[in-house]
Amino acid sequence: MGSEIGLARAIRGLRAELAEAMADGEDEAIKFRIESISLDLQVAVENAHEGHAGLKFWVVSADAGASTASTATHSLSLQLAAETAAGDQVRIASRPERRPD
């Protein structure tokens, strides 16, 4: 397929982006709490043959080109709840102490 992005790598990237957003919003007056994350992906399913039994899921990018045209793709929808290592809800900024004028 060429430039495959595995499902685990895609979710790892999302996690890194959320962590960056949390760090960026740490000192902000207004923060946002993540209620839920809806992740909708197009994936190609590959039957792994090289010594590993099972299936591999590749996230299909918009520039996948002709190599993916012959591969059947499937829609995958994940509902995720973001939480910290302590089990708290993720916030990417805080609530203001007073309402702005």
Image (spheres, rainbow, N blue to C red):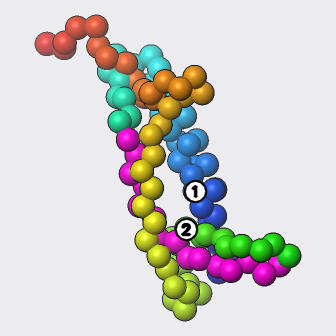
The residue shown at (42%, 61%) is 77
- The image quarter in which residue 19 lies: top right
What residue does disc 1 label? 10
Residue 28 in sight from this viewpoint:
yes
Q: Earlier in the sequence, mark 2 or mark 1?
A: 1
Decide whether the magenta segment is chiefly helix, strand or loop: strand
Mark 2 in CB contact with mark 1 (< 8 angstroms): yes
Q: Quadrant of the C terminus?
A: top left
45 inside magenta stretch: yes
Badge 1 marks a residue whose secondary structure is helix
Few, some or many C-alpha atoms within 10 Å of disc 2 (few <14, some 14-19, many ≥20)?
A: many
Percent coordinates x, y for residue 33 in the rendering: 36, 29
**Is residue 58 shown left or right of residue 28?**
right
14 vs 46: above or below: above
The residue shown at (77%, 74%) is 53
Q: Which residues are magenta?
A: 36-50
